[in-house]
């Protein structure tokens, strides 16, 4: 769900707080929805689902997915949960010339495809998708997030 734009001078809305960790059952449902979206579009991808501390809860890789996507999916998921925002935020910042985040101790992955999973207003984990273009990774990850309950 998108947030309405803030009026000029309004304080930015903070990201949601962390909630209880995503369960294995929830993680499988998120991955299955992302997998189905990728399969429908003939994209070969890897999907990582992490809990609120960035720990891997569930992972799935489609046959034929490039090997680099295994680590990239996990990095995108960790970025989304640790920074409480989509990994695309960092790609957008990089494209705008802001590279200050590259000095962070916890290095974010500046690529679309990592999205926090929010249930009942709390971040319970995140999904990272990798293997397609950044936009394709984002579409598959969003399909996964939409299946979270």
Image: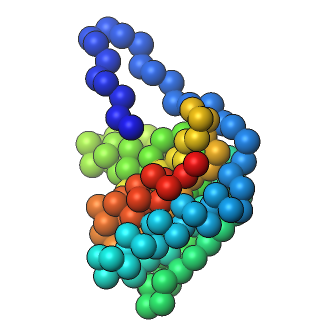
Residue 111 picture location, percent across and down: 39, 58
Q: Based on the displayed image, in which of its 4 quarters is residue 58 positioned?
A: bottom right
**Above or below — where is 1 with respect to 107?**
above
Quadrant housing the N terminus: top left
Q: Residue at x 43, y 40 (%)?
A: 100
Q: Position of residue 113 (x, y in %)?
A: 41, 59
Quadrant of residue 84 within the rendered picture: top right
Q: Would residue 75 be seen by someone viewing this image from the given angle?
A: no
Nearest to the observer: residue 10 or residue 57:
57
Tag count: 0
User: What residue do we see at 66% from left, 36% from top?
Assistant: 18
- The residue most toward the bottom is 64
Q: Nearer the viewer, residue 68 or 23?
A: 23
118 versus 77 height, above or below: above
Can you see residue 36? yes
As displayed, is residue 85 above or below residue 29? above
Q: Is residue 99 left or right of residue 80?
A: left
Tell me what residue is drawn at x 44 percent, y 77 percent: 45
Q: Is residue 59 above or below residue 66?
A: above
Which residue is rendered at x = 28% and y = 43% of the image? 97
Name the side, left or right, on which 128 lies relative to 44.
right
Colour scheme of this structure image?
rainbow
Instruction: Where is residue 50? Give x, y as percent.
Output: 64, 58
Residue 65: percent from left, percent from top: 44, 85
Furthest toward the top, the residue is 9
Quick one: 119 or 80, which is closer to the camera?
119
């Amino acid at each position: 769900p998108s947030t309405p734009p803030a009026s000029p001078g309004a304080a930015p809305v903070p990201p949601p707080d962390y909630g209880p960790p995503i369960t294995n059952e929830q993680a499988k449902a998120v991955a299955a929805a992302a997998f189905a979206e990728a399969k429908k579009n003939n994209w070969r991808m890897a999907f990582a689902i992490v809990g609120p501390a960035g720990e891997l809860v569930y992972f799935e890789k489609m046959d034929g997915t490039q090997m680099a996507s295994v680590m990239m999916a996990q990095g995108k998921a960790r970025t989304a949960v640790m920074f409480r925002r989509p990994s695309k935020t960092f790609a957008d910042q990089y494209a705008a010339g802001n590279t200050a985040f590259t000095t962070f101790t916890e290095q974010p992955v500046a690529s679309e495809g990592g999205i926090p999973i929010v249930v009942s207003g709390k971040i319970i984990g995140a999904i990272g998708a990798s293997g397609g273009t950044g936009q394709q990774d984002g579409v598959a990850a969003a399909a996964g997030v939409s299946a979270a309950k």
